[in-house]
Amino acid sequence: EPEVTQTPSHQVTQMGQEVILRCVPISNHLYFYWYRQILGQKVEFLVSFYNNEISEKSEIFDDQFSVERPDGSNFTLKIRSTKLEDSAMYFCASRDPVAGADEQYFGPGTRLTVT
Amino acid sequence: QKEVEQDPGPLSVPEGAIVSLNCTYSNSAFQYFMWYRQYSRKGPELLMYTYSSGNKEDGRFTAQVDKSSKYISLFIRDSQPSDSATYLCAMTLNNAGNMLTFGGGTRLMVKP
């Protein structure tokens, strides 16, 4: 069964450093998403991406964040200068537009720890 | 008022019990409703998806939507220890690729 994959599973970085989180969405999916989940809190939407551009973003997704689809398979989230409060699980999700519904499939997540 | 509310639990039931999990929401514009299961430190796994008010059944799982009351439910029949997880409801405004808004999750423990 196709699935969303994410690397690395755990990333530790120092405050102020740049990090890139990587995702490989399901191959025929065209909508891509990033969500985050701070420990013990709700899953929160960050950004959606379609047709090589951001289609929607939340207030969390400020100028420190960017997304890119550098090739036909990867989808990345970059945090330019990490803060302690960026520590969270980051989930990538994808969706098949042909499915005609909002069934988003999530990856296993990357645990980001900012020290 | 929070947009989507769930009782955090934990909800502890014996194996074989029928489990009822619920969410309420405040935004009547939500149209699509999903239930995800999340095991500890894993990604959310899609269980059920519904659009209209009414029931949808898939194996041991039944999703119920009451848009007039802004209330959705997930029923699990013949619960198993492997069902022990956190159950998240999520909803979206339309099917144009919009963001999901999640509830905080209900932790379920099914005891053998």
Image: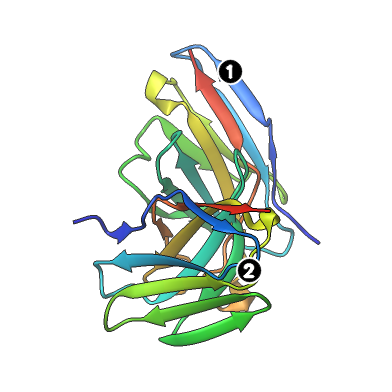
Q: Colour scheme in the image?
A: rainbow
At mark 2, the secondary structure is loop
* Quarter of image, res B15: bottom right
Residue A90 versus residue B7 in the image, above or below: above
Determine the residue positioned at 52% across, 65% down: B35
Outermost residue, left direction? B1
Residue at mark 2: A96
Q: Position of residue A113 (x, y in %)?
A: 52, 21
Count neighbours of disc 1 (C-alpha within 10 A) and say few if under 14, some if 14 to 19, many if 20 or more.
few
Q: Position of residue A89 (x, y in %)?
A: 53, 35
Determine the residue positioned at 24% across, 67% down: B26
Residue at mark 1: A12
Q: Position of residue B102 (x, y in %)?
A: 41, 56
Residue A93 versus residue A113 in the image, above or below: below
Count neighbours of disc 2 (C-alpha within 10 A) and say few if under 14, some if 14 to 19, many if 20 or more.
some
Determine the residue positioned at 43% across, 27% down: A86
Q: Position of residue A53 (x, y in %)?
A: 49, 53
Q: Quadrant of the N terminus of chain A?
A: bottom right
Residue B12 versus residue A97 in the image, above or below: above
Note whether residue B96 is visible: no
- Sequence-wise, which precedes: disc 1 or disc 2? 1
Foreground tag (1 vs 2): 1
Determine the residue positioned at 30% across, 43% down: A59
Residue type, numbered disc 2: Asp
Q: CA distance from mark 1 to mark 2?
A: 32 Å
